[in-house]
Image: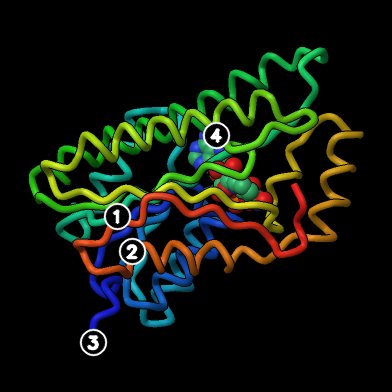
């Protein structure tokens, strides 16, 4: 019986580490052709080589999701290489948490650019293909922080709430094209996400917490596979998951 992943062409942004990298490995092992986007070319090229050498199918395309043209190039490359695009996982994101009064305005700008505009560009790049195919699947990554606001999370939470609001509008509007939409909101997962928090006190508090309760990135990858793997007439719209030990 088909797992509904085998043979699909799946674009993943932020595939150079953490959730995106784990998802690429997991979906490739289930027979998906994965097209990997991130800025660190050497990381995605090594991952693509590992997958191809192991008998899977993968392509690496260096991509900065804040540049609309580069995101279009990523999706076009998937179609050129494999003939179609079935799923786009808009996963690239950053979380430089800080209290508002410290006015890390440049980091606010970057979060808006990567976490919101990056997702919008991913949708803009693939939607014309999906409309033409009358099939497709967007998987957008929000966060528990898109459901709850906590200390130092105001701007990050705002960007992740935006992903949820946009994804609900998208869900409603793409019905005529038979397109599925899924938002996944993870809790604490052990990745490189906290490495880029510039406020040391905030970083330490989160590293301690995620170090205690965080789960491996494969937890997320399994949920992506679950959403894609449903029969085409079943649309998993939202998944919110946490480590069992996470209180917030
Ligand atoms: N880990 C968690 O606990 C958690 C919880 C909730 C939500 N999330 C969300 O999950 C997603 C993945 O994060 P992660 O935890 O896997 O963190 P991560 O290990 O830091 O991975 C982030 C990925 O995003 C990519 N990225 C960052 N800026 C980019 C840009 N401008 N263009 C293209 N790619 C960019 C990075 O690649 P390059 O640096 O190579 O470009 C990297 O592959 C994010 O949206 C994050 O907000 C994570």
Q: Closer to the camera: disc 1 or disc 2?
A: 2
Residue 187 picture location, percent across and down: 65, 52
- In the rendered structure, are the residues bearing label 1 and label 2 in contact, judged by CB atoms less than 8 Å apart? yes
Write down the residue under mark 3.
1
Q: CA distance from mark 3 to mark 1?
A: 20 Å
The reply to whether residue 37 is in sight is no
N-terminal of the pair, mark 1 or mark 2, is 1
| Mark nearer the viewer, 3 or 1 | 3
Quarter of the picture for ligand 1? top right
SS for tag 4? helix
What residue is pinned by disc 2?
228
Image side of residue 215 versus residue 76, left or right: right
User: Dot 4: few (<14), some (14–19), or many (≥20) neighbours within 10 Å?
Assistant: many
Q: Is mark 4 within 8 Å of ligand 1?
A: yes
Q: Which one is in front, 60 or 102?
A: 102
Between the residue at mark 4 and the residue at mark 1, the CA separation in whole angstroms equals: 20 Å
Q: Is residue 229 left or right of residue 62?
A: left
How crowded pointer 2 is (Cα within 10 Å; few <14, some 14-19, many 20+) is rated as many
| Crowding near the residue tagged with mark 1, few <14, some 14–19, many ≥20 C-alpha atoms within 10 Å | many
Quadrant housing residue 220? bottom right
Label 4 near label 2: C-beta < 8 Å?
A: no
> Any atom of ligand 1 within 8 Å of the CB at mark 3?
no
For the residues labelled 4 and 1, say whether their Cβ atoms are less than 8 Å apart. no
- SS assignment at label 1: strand
**Residues marked 3 and 1 touching at CB (< 8 Å):** no
Q: Which residue is mark 1?
A: 87
Residue designated by label 4: 160
Q: Secondary structure at mark 3?
A: loop
Mark with earlier residue (3, 1): 3
């Amino acid at each position: 019986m088909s797992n509904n992943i085998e043979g699909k062409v799946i674009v993943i942004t932020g595939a150079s580490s953490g959730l995106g990298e784990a998802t690429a490995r997991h979906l490739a092992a289930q027979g998906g052709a994965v097209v990997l986007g991130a800025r660190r070319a050497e990381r995605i090229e090594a991952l693509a080589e590992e997958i191809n050498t192991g008998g899977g199918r993968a392509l690496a395309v260096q991509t900065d999701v804040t540049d609309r043209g580069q995101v279009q190039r990523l999706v076009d490359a998937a179609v050129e290489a494999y003939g179609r695009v079935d799923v786009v996982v808009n996963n690239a994101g950053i979380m430089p948490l800080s209290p508002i009064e410290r006015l890390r305005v440049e980091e606010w700008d970057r979060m808006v650019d990567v976490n919101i505009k990056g997702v919008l560009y991913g949708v803009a790049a693939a939607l014309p293909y999906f409309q033409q195919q009358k099939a497709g699947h967007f998987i957008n990554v929000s966060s528990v922080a898109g459901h709850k606001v906590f200390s130092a999370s105001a701007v990050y939470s705002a960007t992740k709430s935006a992903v949820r609001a946009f994804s609900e509008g998208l869900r409603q509007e793409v019905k005529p094209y038979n397109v599925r939409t899924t938002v996944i909101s993870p809790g604490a997962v052990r990745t490189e996400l906290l490495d880029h928090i510039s406020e040391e006190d905030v970083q330490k508090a989160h590293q301690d917490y995620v170090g205690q309760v965080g789960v491996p990135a494969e937890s997320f990858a399994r949920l992506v596979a679950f959403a894609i793997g449903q029969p085409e007439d079943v649309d998993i719209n939202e998944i919110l998951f946490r480590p069992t030990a996470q209180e917030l």
